Amino acid sequence: MSQLNDLPISALHFYLTAPYPCSYLPDLQARSQVATPALLINTQMYSELVQHGFRRSGTYTYRPHCDSCRACVPLRIVAKQFTSNRSQRRAWKQHANLEATLHPLQDNAEYYSLYQRYQRARHKDGGMDNDDHESYQNFLLQSHVDSLLVEFREQGLLRMVSVIDLLSDGLSSVYTFYEPDLPHARLGVYNVLWQIELCRKLDLDYVYLGYWIEHSRKMAYKTQYQPAQGLMDGTWRTLGITSA
């Protein structure tokens, strides 16, 4: 087992997918570079892959590799230097009564019900709103790396669930879903702030938030958490605040 743990990234194989419709920018075609075999990608190796811009969906590890577009920029927050702005401090105070508990990845009917409500409300006609239970399990509950599930409750009521990967240098935010029908709630903002705070408590450096896409309304918000860094041409560089 120790030999497996010490395998370098060069032990992996990488291939390009066929073009497919981009999920974020209309009328564009996307491609991904995929790392295989999945069974070799443990926490140590995945931590290095994330530093090179990869993400995972279940046991599928990939990064954008489009023919003529470089809009997807891997983004991470420098947790120990993070300073919240006024709006973020209001969101933190607004949801201060949430109770967070950590769990291993697990199937739970209550989680899945919340996931379905969230997808129908926030991603209607985006494909994920029709996820069946098996698709949900493959997406969020399958992992070959160190992962945890965080549930957030308010007076016993489930409000939000996050899946997070524990990396050698930080946390990788896999996915978060929350109660979509709470008026004026800012659960998504609170969740990012909570992950930054957890990162600090664990004495880790970064919270990886996936891909920032400046001209995608769903993805542009990520630079609101400062300082932020983006991976461009193989180098992590400081990103300024852009309009969300």
Image (cartoon, rainbow, N blue to C red):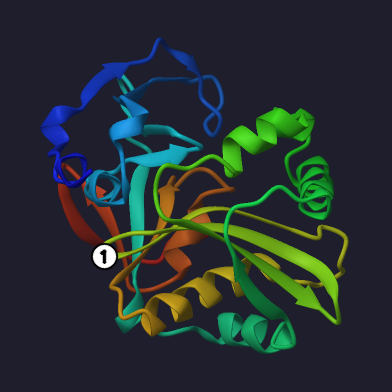
Q: Quadrant of the N terminus?
A: top left
107 horizontally vs 190: left or right: right
Give the residue drawn at x 37%, y 82%: 200
Q: Quadrant of the C terminus?
A: bottom right
Give the residue drawn at x 54%, y 39%: 142
Q: Nearer the viewer, residue 243 or 222?
A: 222
Residue 159 % position (x, y): 78, 67
Q: Which residue is mark 1?
A: 169
- Can you tell which quarter of the image residue 194 is in? bottom right
Q: Is residue 55 visible?
A: yes
Relative to residue 95, is residue 142 depicted above or below? above
Residue 140 % position (x, y): 59, 43
Give the residue drawn at x 39%, y 42%: 55
Relative to residue 135, is residue 119 depicted above or below? below
List the single residue furthest toward the top: 18
Relative to residue 55, is residue 146 depicted above or below? below
- Can you tell which quarter of the image residue 190 is in? bottom right
Label 1 sits on a secondary structure element that is loop
101 horizontally vs 164: left or right: right
Relative to residue 7, is residue 236 depicted above or below? below
94 horizontally vs 213: left or right: right
